[in-house]
Image (cartoon, grey):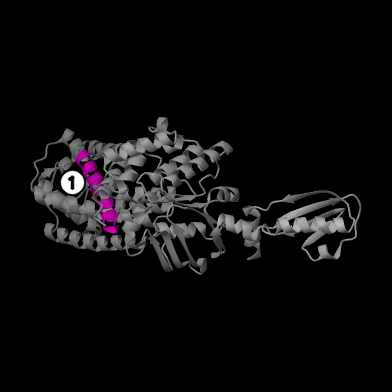
Amino acid sequence: MKSNLVGFYTLFKREFLRFFKVPNNTIFPQLITVLFYFLIFGIAIGSRIKEVSGVPYLLFILPGLFVQVLINGSYSNPSGSLFMSRMWGSINDVLLAPISHAQLTLAFIFAAMLRGIFLGIGAFLIAMIFMSVNIFNFWILLAYVLLISFVFALVGIIVGLWSKTWEQLNIFINFIVTPLTFLGGVFYTLDMVPGLIAKITVWNPIFYMINGVRYGMLGIKDGSVYLGLLFLVIIGLGMFGFVFYLIKKGYNLRT
Amino acid sequence: MDSVVIKNLKKNYGKILAVNDVSFSVKKGEIFGFLGPNGAGKTTTINCMCQLSSISSGTIKIEGFDVKKDYLDAKKQIGLSPQDIQFDPLFKIIDVLTYQAGYFGMPVKKATLRAEKLLKDFGLFEKRNQTMRELSGGMKRKFSIIKALIHNPKILILDEPTAALDVDSRYEMWAFIKKVKKQGITIILTTHYIEEAEKLSDRVAIINKGKLIKLDRTSKIIDDLSQNVITIYFDEHIKMPFAIKKLKHKYVDKKLEITVSKKDQSKVLRETLKIFEESNISVQDFNVHQDNLENIFRRLVNEK
């Protein structure tokens, strides 16, 4: 059979567009949260901190908040979609269709990445209300954005397939991703925090993601940008292989 | 060529053997009734055909395509309207249909035209901009069948298509199923309403506890396995003639019931009446109760 590109594109389109159906759940809360971060952390608290690593504090926290939104968007799209369609049974619409395992995997990943990037751009535009940014290295920034959204799209697929309850679905984002993001240097540099927190931070993978995006946006860094990229490529490829295996096996999809 | 060929299908859920060495084929263009009590293995077999369940052992070929080796081609041939109506409540029904057609490789314009046509055929066109939540139970059932037909499948699987439908809707559905058959589409029908299977199916397979226990033309099953009852009423108590005692009978309260197969029915009735006439026993009245597929089904399932 010929490759079903129409089927792949249809699934991708549907997976991307479905989050526009419930904007009060999927778009506005994230962007409003970002707005409040800028208002409270940037203006109220940030006004007492003059500069961090040579840039205004408001500008310093932008990359971290951008990464947070990017991660949330990329993760939430497939995790929520797969979990709910499994609960509703509508996942069978996709499973009955002649879409290959690779196409199915990629459609979910690309839709998730696009949602993450879409929300990230939204957060960036909100930031523009408060500041102006001259992108330091666009290609590094783009590479990080694509790899971060890719990795968290894969994480979202795994959690969406694994979860059997709403509680399980939320455990990962509430107890792992959010704490790691806050401890990943969104609001601080390594020299601003006590030794123990600095030590924890350097073992936090999200620290390298924020570090890379911060370098791409502002040209400042706390660790190796290229090591971070390598780490993301390796973890991304490994996870892609794992997710493809799960989809092919029909893990929690087929009985 | 047969539309579906299943050979030695086995499906385990852990230690539970849900389908046990089932083999059958479904002929092109026929309505194939697939019957069995709850938990018999009907839906599991269907899910294996549609690849919603993996196969433990055996083979399934759909229009010549092996569901394991040629899974994409096999999937393209089937439209499934499942027992439980499954839907994504976020999308309008017209969008659900165009997406579903798209999954099967149909471009948007063609998919929209096809969706609109089917919605008109089923009387749901006015509802096209509503979500599934806004449809009644009967409308949801119809929609489920439209969705199964959207990509012009060669095989339509209807798993309990008339469950929860009122009488009028059920008759409407039967007429529709016959109409689909006329288009040359093979239909596999599972139902709890045996009367439905009897009226619609060309052939019937009965599955129980994961095993196929009967498969034949519906009319042949009824002819072969019917146990019709001849009831004869008398004015007074009688002494049963010896010749009658040899038949499978029950005599209670001036009423004699003789159980016979459909093919022997006329002969037995004629001979019985003759015996009573020769024995000077006066018969007040008699009637014949025709057996049906439902009774046959119940007997088969309980016997096995």
Give the side of residue B49 with respect to residue A225, left or right: right
Main secondary structure of the magenta stretch:
helix
Query: Residue under circle 1?
Result: A63
Give the side of residue A254 with respect to residue B194, left or right: left
What is the chain letter for disc 1?
Answer: A
Q: Counting other residues with Cα less than 10 Å from the Cα at mark 1, is it few (<14), some (14-19), or many (20 or more)?
A: many
| Image location of residue B230, percent across then percent down | 76, 54
Seen at 26% across and 52% down, the residue is: A4
User: Residue B298's image quarter?
Assistant: bottom right
| Image location of residue A199, percent across then percent down | 23, 61
Seen at 25% across and 47% down, the residue is: A6
Quadrant for the N terminus of chain A in the image: bottom left
Residue A102 is one of the magenta-drawn residues? yes
The residue lying toward the viewer, choosing from B292 and B151, is: B292
User: Residue B208's image quarter?
Assistant: bottom right
Seen at 9% across and 50% down, the residue is: A139
Amino acid type, residue under disc 1 in the picture: Pro
User: Which residues are the magenta region?
Assistant: A99-122
